[in-house]
Image: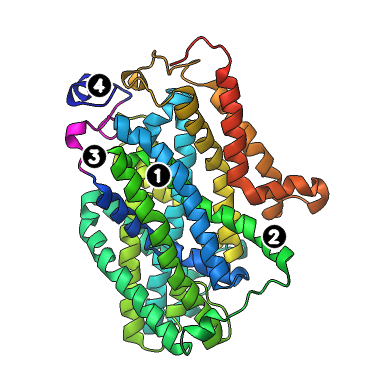
Amino acid sequence: MYANDSIVDELKGSPLAGEDLSPVPSSKRSWSTWNYAALWISMSLCIPTYMLASSLIEGGMNWWQAMITILLGNTIVLIPMILNGHAGTKYGIPFPVFARASFGIKGANIPALLRAIVACGWFGIQTWIGGFAIYQMARLWIPSLETIPDIFPASFDLHTGPAICFILFWLLNMYVVYLGVDSIKKLLVFKAFFLPVAAIALLIWAIQAGNGLGPILETPSKFANSTAFWIYFFPALTGMVGFWATLSLNIPDFTRYATSQQAQIKGQALGLPTSMTLFAFIGVVVTSASTIIFGTTIWDPVVLAGKFENKLLVSIAMIAVAISTLATNIAANIVSPANDFAHLSPNKISFRTGGYITGILGILIFPWKLIADPTGYIFTWLIAYSSLLGPVGGIMIADYYFIRKKELQLKALYQHNGIYSYTNGFNRKAVIALVLGILPNIPGFLLTVKLIQKDLFPAWITTLYNYAWFVGFGISGIVYWMLMKKPQTKHA
């Protein structure tokens, strides 16, 4: 049953609906192929994308190895992106509501919260990047900012100067949340023009300062042999898939506005792999050039810009980075978790409240530690959360395509006593499948963050973590399908 105005009217007042969770009727859908391509171009043009590519160079890859890894990773994640986007377009429902079909009316809070917590982490990372850009500018004009005595414990790895700028930028983000999403529209337009221009300018500088593309692209791989390369490649590929593992789940939040399935499929296929690969190429070239120019690999563009001697140039660049980061942060890392938190209590938690919750959790993850080095960025952050979101994606796709055959009962998704209520609102089979998909990756994660000794588990078990998204996706999807194929009392 496709969403129409009459169904939306029937759902008004439902405690499971709310303004942000109700289906979008076909009469109010206007997103075309170009809109989805533009969405991905906009979201791909961000500092973390640049750092994604440059981290591979810092990790030891040469330019073409890094590009193939990024292109392959984004092509792989495009598949669940399109598959999950189908339900959003067909029924006009957001991610938390779509999850009710497989996890249950109350059980949907589990994947929604997992997704929201990851978004909080990204919010913290983007806020740290914006705050550090402000610090790089401010220290040029106020040198004493670098010498302020440290007030945080040594274990925090946080100096006072950057911390002050981080908190100020965080407060600015919270003020935008208070004003509402509409206040960010002009900043998004600014970002759409500034970031491409800035990226091209940085590329031109790298080519000129590095004596042309030749020396840059001739920079060899740091791996001693093919074995060393493959050991690094597979976890790196998992990290590339993990980069957009969040959006591969909550893509219905956007595809619910599509005019047709073709619009969301073509738009995403045209926008995601191409824009990510092209912008990542700039990161690869500039990072490789930094090795030639400065004698050391600088994978953080904000740190790189801070090495320029012209105060005014650095100041303009850092202010622009902060503004564009602010726009990206609100659009990509506030809207979705705010919906997820609202799902806990649609009539009590507003967008603003959800935004504040996101902001607080974004500080508590210590984002400055996650991106302190490329190893932490890929192996700790990207792979770790992919081990949580891969299983969710496997369950939702198995349910929608193999159990439901793409047929959902729309009204029942908003009913406490409907077919998706399962047992007290929870589909225990989905929870079991989720846990079984996460468990194999835990030993490898604990070893990566150095909470266990290397010989505590067999090597083949801890190595599974290098394939975390794939392992979780496959195990949870298959287990869920097997459990749900058995006779049950409540089945849509």
Mark 4 surroundings: few (<14), some (14-19) or many (≥20) residues within 10 A? some
The residue where tag 4 is placed is: 11
Q: CA–CA distance between discs 4 and 3?
A: 22 Å
Tell me which amino acid carries mark 1.
Ile
- Of callouts 2 and 1, the N-terminal one: 2
Q: Which of the two discs, 2 and 1, sits closer to the camera?
A: 2
In the rendered structure, which amino acid carries the disc numbered 3?
Answer: Thr
Q: In terms of sequence position, does the residue under pointer 4 or pointer 1 come before the other?
A: 4
* Mark 1 surroundings: few (<14), some (14-19) or many (≥20) residues within 10 A: some
Up/down of 240 relative to 259, above or below: below
Tell me the amino acid under the disc marked 4. Answer: Leu
Pointer 1 residue: 357
Q: Name the N-terminal-most of marks 4 and 2.
A: 4
Q: What range of the chain is rendered magenta?
A: 17-30
Gap in Å between the C-alphas at discs 4 and 2?
A: 52 Å
Query: At which x and y percent is residue 38?
Result: 29, 56
Q: Residue at x 38, y 23 (%)?
A: 407
Kindly indicate the quadrant of the structure image that contains residue 95. Answer: top left
The answer to whether the residues at label 4 and label 3 have Cβ atoms under 8 Å apart is no
Residue 400, image x and y in percent? 44, 28
Residue at numbered disc 2: 231
